[in-house]
Image (tube, grey):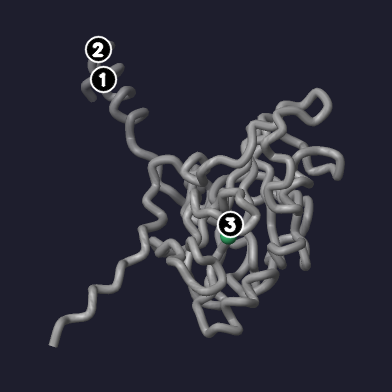
Amino acid sequence: MELLDTSSRSLLLAAVLSLPLCASAANPPAVSCPLEKVAEIRDNDVCALQGGDYLSNRRSGKIHGALDLNAAVGDKVLATKAGIVVVAAEKWADMGTAVIIDHGDGGYTVYGHLDEAKVKKGAKVVAGQQVGTVGFTGNSDCLQKNKLPPHLHFGYLNAGKAGLARRDYPIAEIERWGAAWEEAFYGDVLAVGVQHPQMAIEGLTCWAKPQKKPPPKKS
Ligand SMILES: [Zn+2]
């Protein structure tokens, strides 16, 4: 048997080490889209005159600060990154049934108007794991009444610090939809605030602008 010389051995070793790892249950992806499809961002409708984009204004004068992703009732809602579930509750103010995940790096993702939460508070989740289903809870019942499609309200908060799910810390503030988020500090904690959800899933294509209907043809 011919033995490999030192340089051939190190080349072989380098080749083995550079083999790509297969994504499997043991190696979940680092990030996932919040729905199993590229979702259309909610267009203007009677319930939200400016639609559901990040910068859409709300009656309060504040920006929406999240994305409304059109879907169907019962569609799977997935964790975009690994973390710990810090909120899994019904009747979370206007957000209805909501799940919030603490990603441990100061970032939190928010999933609102769920039909059902599929995780419990305290659960550890991986990216791509189902955390709920799309529904019409909270103030999105307006859509149901107007026969419009439901959506996932998907938001990202950068609080700058993990473990802020206690009542007196910033994560609790989103229950009041953006109240006081302009304030930079809560005690000694810097609240960096609501950021574009692209922060949570950088590099993934998970949503698209609403397709504008073509203008009516002249007859
Ligand atoms: Zn929303």
Tell me the SS state at disc 3.
Answer: loop
Image height check: is 45 above or below 189? below
Q: Amino acid at mark 2?
A: Ser
Mark 2, other Cα within 10 Å: few <14 / some 14–19 / many ≥20: few
Q: Closer to the camera: disc 3 or disc 1?
A: 3
Tell me the SS state at disc 2.
Answer: helix
Image height check: is 19 above or below 188? below
Res. 129 visible in picture: no
- Residue denoted by label 2: 7
Tell me the SS state at disc 1.
Answer: helix
Image height check: is 108 above or below 176? above
- Residue denoted by label 3: 58
Number of numbered discs on residues: 3
Q: Indicate left or right for 20 with 23 as reference.
A: left
Q: Residue at x 53, y 68 (%)?
A: 151
Q: Residue at x 51, y 43 (%)?
A: 196
Q: Indicate left or right for 110 with 148 as reference.
A: right
Callout 2: CB less than 8 Å from ligand 1: no
Classify residue 115 by image quadrant: bottom right
Asked whether the residues under the numbered discs 2 and 1 touch, taking CB atoms below 8 Å apart as contact, a structural biologist would say: yes
Give how far across and how far down residue 7 sits, in percent. 24, 12
Res. 130 visible in picture: yes
Quick one: label 2 or label 3, which is nearer the N terminus?
2
Callout 1: CB less than 8 Å from ligand 1: no
Q: Amino acid at mark 1?
A: Leu
- Residue denoted by label 1: 11
